[in-house]
Image (tube, rainbow, N blue to C red):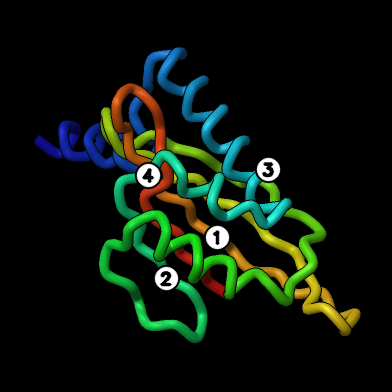
């Protein structure tokens, strides 16, 4: 019994192996999101989403928002920032239709030279055979 529990726990920690095609399409979705974030093209970031949840500093946790609403809030959040880096730390598919990417964001607020670093979690959901952004969670 203890061995089964240990194996199950290891599977949760390490993640389950996913088919190469699913992982490669996830990698492509993460890369598209990374590029859109760096360019502050928030409409491209959420364009394939049905709804998006936002957890942004200084803004109450949102209910699920339509892409247009999410795009406006993200644009407001990003408007005073100059992106320096937005790099992938890890991406993991946690179910057939859910995945997360952990990103490291380094930026400066326009008019300053102080570099700031935050962690951004991007949640993805499989919709119509494609990964779409489902959640943005920013933590210090």
Tell me which label, 1 or 3, sits earlier in the chain: 3
The residue positioned 31% from the left and 53% from the top of the image is 51
| Residue furthest left as drawn | 1
Q: Whole-percent x and y of residue 16? A: 33, 28
Residue 19 in the image: above or below residue 109: above
Front tag of 2 and 1? 2
Going from N to C along the chain, the mark reached first, 2 or 4, is 4
Q: Which residue is mark 3?
A: 35
* Sequence-wise first label, 2 or 3: 3
SS of the residue under disc 2: strand
C-alpha distance separating marks 1 and 3: 14 Å
Query: Residue 9: horizontal and vertical position, in percent?
Result: 26, 41
Which of pointers 4 and 1 lies earlier in the amino acid sequence? 4
Badge nearest the viewer, 4 or 1: 4
What residue is disc 2 on?
A: 55
- Identify the element where label 1 is drawn: strand
Q: Is residue 77 left or right of residue 22?
A: right
Q: CA distance from mark 2 to mark 4?
A: 16 Å
Tell me the quarter of the image containing the C terminus. Answer: bottom right
């Amino acid at each position: 019994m203890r061995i089964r529990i240990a194996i199950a726990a290891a599977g949760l920690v390490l993640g389950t192996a996913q088919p190469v095609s699913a992982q490669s399409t996830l990698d492509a979705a993460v890369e598209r999101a990374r590029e859109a974030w760096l360019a502050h093209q928030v409409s491209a970031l959420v364009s394939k989403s049905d709804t998006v949840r936002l957890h942004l500093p200084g803004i109450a946790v949102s209910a699920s928002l339509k892409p247009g609403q999410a795009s406006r809030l993200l644009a407001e959040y990003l408007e005073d920032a100059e992106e320096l880096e937005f790099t992938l730390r890890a991406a993991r598919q946690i179910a057939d239709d859910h995945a997360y990417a952990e990103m490291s964001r380094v930026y400066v607020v326009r008019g300053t030279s102080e570099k700031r670093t935050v962690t951004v979690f991007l949640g993805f959901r499989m919709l119509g055979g494609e990964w779409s952004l489902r959640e943005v969670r920013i933590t210090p």
